[in-house]
Image (tube, rainbow, N blue to C red):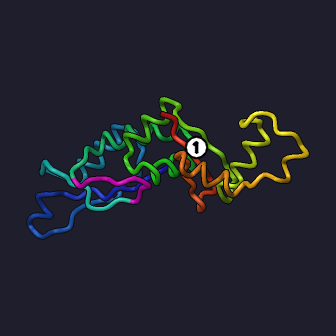
Amino acid sequence: MLINVYIANLAKYNEGKLVGRWVTLPMERHELKQCIRDVLGKDEEYAIHDYESPFAIGEYEDVFAINDDMKILNRYDDRLVVALCEFLGNRNEVIQALQAGEFIVYYDIDDLADVAEQMVEEGLFGHVPPSVIPYLDYGKIARDLQHDGWYLSRQLRIAVRLQS
């Protein structure tokens, strides 16, 4: 996964001049240093004035820390990362959950009823006799899953539950 941040020269901005550059992260640290040097010239401070990312980025965040975080996030499936960003909103919490493995995920689902059906098929509710399966109300099970902390991203067709 790649994100874009617009790094602006803060001194020039305060003078009413727009001097900056879009940077795609992650990149090698030395390349990022050079990009910032190119934007700043002899000035010292930058700010992030725009971004394209599944998580929020503050104007005065350390772009090197964001770059390092992106290197971590890129170890995981993009859809999972984006879904967790939607659900948690904070990239540090997303990284913490991913590194701890504290999640359950189902891919290529349309709703939580699909998750309920897969859980029954996998035996997560114990053995359900085949003669009983047609009588199960997956919609009601899905409502319970939602109350139990499952997050659904219809756009990504993914369901995630954090384990705590």
**Residue 164, percent from left and from top:** 47, 33
- Which residue occupies 77% across, 38% down? 122
Which span is picked out in magenta? 52-59
Q: Is residue 52 left or right of residue 125?
A: left
Residue denoted by label 1 = 77
Is residue 135 positioned above or below 120 on the image? below
- Which residue occupies 41% across, 43% down? 27
Does residue 29 appear in this view?
A: yes
Is residue 79 positioned above or below 76 on the image? below
Does residue 78 appear in this view?
A: no
Residue 58 falls within the magenta-colored stretch: yes
**Residue 75, percent from left and from top:** 53, 36
**Residue 2, percent from left and from top:** 47, 51
| Residue reaching furthest to the right | 131
- Which residue occupies 46% across, 36% down? 97
* Nearest to the observer: residue 141 or residue 43: 141
Quadrant of residue 29 within the rendered picture: top left
| Residue reaching furthest to the bottom | 16
Residue kind at label 1, given as amino acid type: Asp
